[in-house]
Structure formats: C-alpha cells, structure tokens
Amino acid sequence: MPKTSSRLEVFPDSAISYMVRLAEQYHAINLAQGVPDFDPPGDLLAAAENAIRSGYNQYSSTWGSLRLRQAIAAKQSHFSGLEIDPDQHVTVTVGGTEALLATLTAVTDPGDKVIIFSPHYEAYIVDSRLLGAQLIHIPLHPPALTFDPDDLRQAFKNRARVLILCNPANPTGKVFSRSELQIIADLAQEYDTFVLADEIYEHIVYPPNEHTYIASLPGMFERTISCSSVSKTYAVTG
C-alpha cells in the first residue's frame, strides 16, 4: 500500500474524539464536546428547510452568498460597534474550524511562530503543526486564569507572526478583561503581529463579565481576523 502524506504524522488522536468514545462506552455524561442541551430555534430550522426547497442548494459565491454576508456584517457591526463591509470584511466558511485553518494558512509560512494561551482548544496545535508553524505557549494561571505580561512580551519578541486569542476561552470559559486585551493589542501593534480572535462563544457570557471584541480596540481592526460561528449560539453544531 502506498505511503500516505507525512503531514498526517503531526495529527495526534483527537482527545475530544477519544473522550466521546469513552462517554458512549460507559454511558457517562460527556463534558468533552460542546454539544448544546437545547434545540435550535424553530424559525432557523424552518428557514433552512425553506431555503433548501426554494433552490438555494447549489454553488454559492466562493466567499459566501451576498445576503448571508450582509446579515453577518449587520450583526457584527451592531455588537462590535465597527463598520463591517460585507464585501471587504466577511468570508463565510464551512464552520469555525475551517475558518481557523484558513486564517492560519493565510497569515503564516512554515517556521513562523504562533502564540497560544494554555489550556486551549486542541485544533490550534494540529492546525499549526500541519502548516509547519512553531507554537509558543503562554500559561493562564489559576484561579483567575491571568497571564504574565512579561511572558507575553517575550513571546512577541521571538518574532511571533500571529497570536490566537480564544475569547471567551475554550475550555476554561475565561473572559479576557478589557485591560488584558489592551496589553495584547499594544504588543501586537508594537511587534506588527496578527491576532486571530476565535470568538465562537461571544454571546455566551455571564455577569459580571462582558465580551469585548479585540478588533474594536484602537489600531486593531487592520490586524485582527475574527472567527465565529452560529453553531454554539443557535445549537446547530452539526
């Protein structure tokens, strides 16, 4: 049998998949996978069915249908306070995981350094290794899950190409404060670094926490790629 690509050697067995199998085997509560415990909105299901039956079931624009991009731009403008252009600023992907990989592919070359906060979503490691990028881990220290600004500055000094910011964070649920985001923003601008903002949980935030879009901070819009998804907010992970 011919040998498969050496790229596959960087893919470990998914911890999430392993835990899902164990939960199924032992009939345990599965806390490893973010599956909502509520049904999707009925209006959403009806609209999806109607769209499919009305002919919206073939190729669309490569970067997403105009009406969908307009809706995303309007929603993001409303919540972030930014002026989002559906033609210039929005690309639709098949889920947030594809958006993450596409973004890292666009902003990194083999050997580039990627900063991630730990603990983190496992796809960040797999995607970075697949692209030949080197990871720099910044620990989040309990109980408040804070980071050391000096550690972060040193990571930027190592010529990092991009920082991945999961906010609110998976798997800890940490919501980065505005002051923490300002530290990240200042360093990103000082060292001319991209920020990949994984904001899939942007609407699942509980008081007294508030979600701040890092792209909305001064000087950050031009260097921030924000990735999100309807999957968690509307319970349509499949």
Image (tube, rainbow, N blue to C red):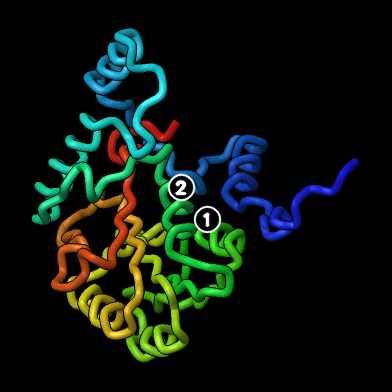
Residue at image coords 25%, 52%: 202
Looking at the image, the residue that sits furthest to the top is 53
Image quadrant occupied by the C terminus: top left
Above or below residue 136? Residue 79 is: above
Above or below residue 232? Residue 152 is: below
Q: Reading the chain from its start, which is encountered first: label 2 or label 1?
A: 2
Residue toward you, 16 or 97: 97
Residue 68 figure quarter:
top left
- SS type, badge 2: helix
Q: Which residue lies under the disc numbered 2?
A: 97
Q: Badges 2 and 1: C-beta atoms under 8 Å apart?
A: yes
Above or below residue 55? Residue 97 is: below
Residue 54 image offset from top left, x and y in percent: 30, 9
- The three-letter code of the residue at mark 2 reads Thr
Residue toward you, 211 or 197: 197
Left or right: where does residue 128 sit relative to residue 174? Answer: right
- The three-letter code of the residue at mark 1 reads Ala
Mark number, residue 123: 1
Residue 161 image offset from top left, x and y in percent: 43, 74
Image quadrant occupied by the N terminus: top right
Q: Residues within 10 Å of mark 1 (few under 14, many from 20)?
A: some
Residue at image coords 20%, 64%: 221
